Image (spheres, rainbow, N blue to C red):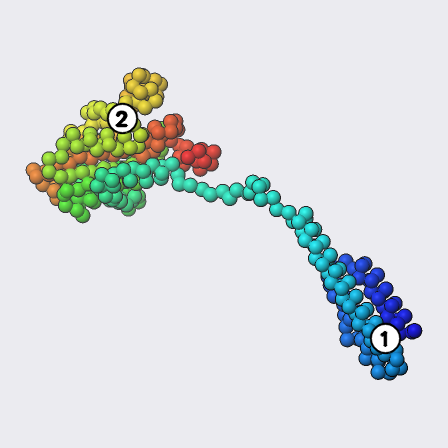
Amino acid sequence: MDVLEQLENILNKAKVDITNVTSLEKLEQLKIKYLGRKSEISSILKSLGKLAQDIRPIVGKKSNEVKREITALLEKRNQELLESIFTRLETDEKIDITEPGEKVKIGHTHPITQMRIEVEDIFTSMGFSIMSGPEIELEYYNFEALNIPKDHPARDMQDTIWTKDGNLLRTHTSCVQIRTMEKFRPPIRVIAPGRVFRYEETDASHEHTFYQVEGLMIDKDISVSNLIAVMKTMLKEVFHRDVKVRLRPGYFPFVEPGFELDINCLICGGEGCPVCKYSGWVELLPCGLVHPNVLRAGNIDPEEYSGFAFGMGLDRLVMMRYEINDIRLFHSGDLRFLEQF
Ligand code: PHE
């Protein structure tokens, strides 16, 4: 019978087409071709009424069988294609989550900044506040108020960089002593970390720009013992061990008496080595009791109050901790150096 044969042919063609198809889009087109409104089967079904009564149910049944079979074939092929897509993805776009990733480089604070923050933490834990002052200073704060008059030879000790309008780049953080006294009344406990500048030829131990931490404590009956106690506490925290200190006389116009504070050499423990030049001691920082003239400049009565002050080189402290032998490395911008911290 013609129509039945036709249906058989449709099924056979569909089998071949569906087996050969390799993409989901093409499969969709086949679905339309074989089962859509304009498909051969559709038109056969539409024209059922024109067939003889006796064969009508046979053709109808056969048509539906073929339809069902093609639907099943399409479904099966659809499944196969989906699976092959995922298998391909698994191999082509395989991600090995155990493979080390690409590291994102992040920076970190400069070793001097790290030390500054550490020192700030130590002093704030002892009740000190943190002060700051300008890097471009008035001559008055850098010299006069600190008991260094114009013709004083001590001005030559610190080679100054002047601005055209007669101001200067502060040569030390001691200026903040006066600025603090102008703002606060005793008891005063402050540190003032900051950048200072000197007109200086650079070498392994000299820079034109470096960092100091000024310390100032003013109260009734402040003596050298208070100074030593605070220094020892600070050093113990910085170097994580007990540090011996000794005071030698040192001259600075703004302290009286003035000292150079030495610590026992941390490299050799005091036995003597090249770092301490076989003396067992290393110079750490200048300090002393605040000169009465300086207290007066800050409007504080030296009969009633006394105080100590110190000026610590922050670069120096970092150099001692890590045994760095050239201060110029700090500003070198050399990552091989900086990445070590
Ligand atoms: N300002 C001094 C300097 O830079 C250091 C210092 C500070 C000395 C405080 C005594 C007291 O050389």
Q: Where's residue 310, x and y in %?
A: 22, 34
- The residue furthest left is 303
Q: Residues within 10 Å of mark 2 (few under 14, many from 20)?
A: many
Name the residue rendered at 20%, 45% in the picture: 179
Name the residue rendered at 84%, 61% in the picture: 16
Q: CA distance from mark 1 to mark 2?
A: 109 Å
For mark 2, what is the residue?
243
The quarter of the picture where the N terminus appears is bottom right
Query: Which comes sooner in the sequence, label 1 or label 2?
Result: 1
Q: Is residue 148 visible?
A: no
Is 16 left, or right, of 110 in this rendering?
A: right
Q: Where's residue 218, x and y in %?
A: 15, 39
The foreground one among 73 and 242 is 73
Does dot 2 land on a helix, a strand or a loop? Answer: loop
Name the residue rendered at 27%, 30% in the picture: 236
Q: Is residue 108 visible?
A: yes
The amino acid marked with disc number 1 is Ile
Is 13 left, or right, of 226 in this rendering?
A: right
Name the residue rendered at 17%, 44% in the picture: 181
For mark 1, what is the residue?
58
Q: Residues within 10 Å of mark 1 (few under 14, many from 20)?
A: few
